[in-house]
Amino acid sequence: MSAFLFDRLHDGLGRVLDLRQAQHGITASNLANATTPGFRARFIPFDKILARAVGRGDPMELARLDPRHVLSAGADPKNPEVDEIEPPPWAADGNSVDPEREVVRLTENQMMYEAVSAGLSKRMAMLRYAASDGRG
């Protein structure tokens, strides 16, 4: 029944929300460790993940044709691919956290989360409308 009501787009948007939530936690960790010597800032490379999702990723990567197939590394929303940022040569303590960059990443992530959430809310409102025979 759920496959009838909730299509691949609905499931995909839910996974995007999970990834955005994970990115929020990673960015908060980056900001908390801004003064920790040797700490490397991390982030989820959404551009790579999206390219893979729409079929523009690595042409040598195997296709997952059956839900029982094992996910490739970084493809699972519960354990996403995370990249590290190398510290700049002038960072004496080896820390790669730039607080300004992290605040921008946090703001962008919040806006994208809210946009996807609004899209899911609209889809649910359309289902409610259809389920009530257009009466509200």
Image (cartoon, rainbow, N blue to C red):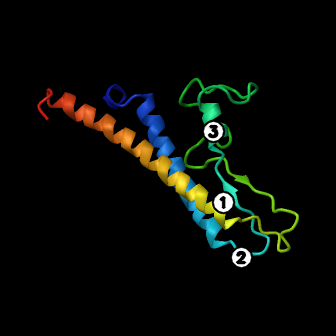
Closer to the observer: label 1 or label 3? Answer: 1
Which residue is tagged 2?
Answer: 35
The mark that comes first in sequence, 1 or 3, is 3
User: Can residue 11 be spotted in the picture?
Assistant: yes
The percent coordinates of residue 88 (x first, y second) are 83, 62
Which residue is tagged 3?
Answer: 49
Q: Residue at x 67, y 38 (%)?
A: 48
The amino acid sitting under disc 3 is: Ile
Q: Residue furthest right?
A: 89
Q: Residue at x 66, y 47 (%)?
A: 81
- Tag 2 and tag 1, C-beta contact below 8 Å: no
Q: Horizontal placement of 91 versus 29: left or right? A: right
Between the C-alphas of marks 2 and 1, the distance is 15 Å
To which quarter of the image does residue 38 belong?
Answer: bottom right
Q: Residue at x 44, y 30 (%)?
A: 9
Which residue is tagged 1?
Answer: 101
The percent coordinates of residue 13 (x first, y second) are 46, 38
